[in-house]
């Protein structure tokens, strides 16, 4: 058996930015004596101001990760590079981000593996793109589809910040997923599909076209009506396995001596995840053995789950999503690209 020397293996994209002393352009978490956290981007000659005094960026640059430093007034700060979960929750954003707890489940239950060919829509602020790129590595392929150019710009800035520049396995295409993906991807060439959108059932034919037999399709939806409609559309197509639906709740614990109890606050419902697998073209899905009981529903209730329902009703506002102003999007795009510009200036 032969072994490959570690020195002959090229360093994965972004790995260098995750280790070593702090450098200009790095994001650093400053945790003060009362456990309050501030995240700064290091700049030559820059300063961090608080009611406890001034901390010079130059005093941080060159220190190892995990250092403790005092500001000009003797107030101490703990210095750490943000983990991926920290960055996602604090990064510039336009759209709401997929929480780390859900991204982890998408990677695990969606079976995202190194070297996988993955397509996703929509990109939002790039939170899930970061997790997918870390999972597939430099030799995989992530093709992201986004309808809004403003969101794409924010996502590019955030991804470049995490990986220290453009990732070689990533590309973004603008436009509607169900139209663009069949133009840009060969039939049966994609290993995994991940959709985060209002009406993923509209993309069923496109997903069935590009997803390879045995490939996994994961949907991220916020509401029960969306989940129900996606599942019923998948079942009716006969091209996929029986969908699996679940949500993930994370509850922290307070541990202090004998005072051990659940935290009063928790990250509860964020979204539902739906996973299914593509069957071979010649195969027909096996329906559930147990028949659903017949119920008497009003006609207006039934149409909410059927193709006859008015598509104009499926809007972000109707499903409880908050709108984002153009001004906020422009500011988020500038903030997302700032670390990369700082590195380039050095």
Image (cartoon, rainbow, N blue to C red):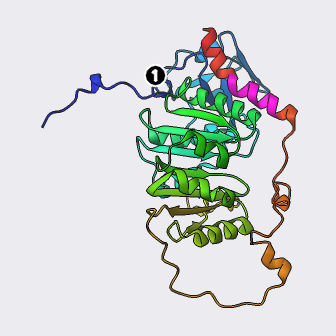
For the view shown, which residue lies furthest in the left direction?
1
Residue pointed to by mark 1: 20
Side of 326 relative to 139 (left or right): right
- Quarter that holds the N terminus: top left
Compared with 273, 326 (above or below) is above
Task: Classify residue 174 as left or right of residue 218.
Answer: right
> Magenta region: which residues?
329-337
Q: Residue at x 64, y 41 (%)?
A: 145
Q: Look at 65% across and 65% down and name the residue there.
A: 230
In the picture shown, does residue 57 fall above or below 294? above
Q: Residue at x 69, y 58 (%)?
A: 202
Q: Nearer the viewer, residue 201 or 125?
A: 201
Specify the quadrant of the image occupied by residue 338: top right
The answer to whether residue 196 of the structure is visible from this angle is: yes
Q: Quadrant of residue 166?
A: top right
Toward the viewer: 163 or 304?
Answer: 304
In the rendered image, the quadrant that contains the C terminus is: top right
Residue 287 magenta-highlighted:
no
Task: Give the number of callouts.
Answer: 1
Q: Residue 150, percent across and down?
A: 76, 33
């Amino acid at each position: 058996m032969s072994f490959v020397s570690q020195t002959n293996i090229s360093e994965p994209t972004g790995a260098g930015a995750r280790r070593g002393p702090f450098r200009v352009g790095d994001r650093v978490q400053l945790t003060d004596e009362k456990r309050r956290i501030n995240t700064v981007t290091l700049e030559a000659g820059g300063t961090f101001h608080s009611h406890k005094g001034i901390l010079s960026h130059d005093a941080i640059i060159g220190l190892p990760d995990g250092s403790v430093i005092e500001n000009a007034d003797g107030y101490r700060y703990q210095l750490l590079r943000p983990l991926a979960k920290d960055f996602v929750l604090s990064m510039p954003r336009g759209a709401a981000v997929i929480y780390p707890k859900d991204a982890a489940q998408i990677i695990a239950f969606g079976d995202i593996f190194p070297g996988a060919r993955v397509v996703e829509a929509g990109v939002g602020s790039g939170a899930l793109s970061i997790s997918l790129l870390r999972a597939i590595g430099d030799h995989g392929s992530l093709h992201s589809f986004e309808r809004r150019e403003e969101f794409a710009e924010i996502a590019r800035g955030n991804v470049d910040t995490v990986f220290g520049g453009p990732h070689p396995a990533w590309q973004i295409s603008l436009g509607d997923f169900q139209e663009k993906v069949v133009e840009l991807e060969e039939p049966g060439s994609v290993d995994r599909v991940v959709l985060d959108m209002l009406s993923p059932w509209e993309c069923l034919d496109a997903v069935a076209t590009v997803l390879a037999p045995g490939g996994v399709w994961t949907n991220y939806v916020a509401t029960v009506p969306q989940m129900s409609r996606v599942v019923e559309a998948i079942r009716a197509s006969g091209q996929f396995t029986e969908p699996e639906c679940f949500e993930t709740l994370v509850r922290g614990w307070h541990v202090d001596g004998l005072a051990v109890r659940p935290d009063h606050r928790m990250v509860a419902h964020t979204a539902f995840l739906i996973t299914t697998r593509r069957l071979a073209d010649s195969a027909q899905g096996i329906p559930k053995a147990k028949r659903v009981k017949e119920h008497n529903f009003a006609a207006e209730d039934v149409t909410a789950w059927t193709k006859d329902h008015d598509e104009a009703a499926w809007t972000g506002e109707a499903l409880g999503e908050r709108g984002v102003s153009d001004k906020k999007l422009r500011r988020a795009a500038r903030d997302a690209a700032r670390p990369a510009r700082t590195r380039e200036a050095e």
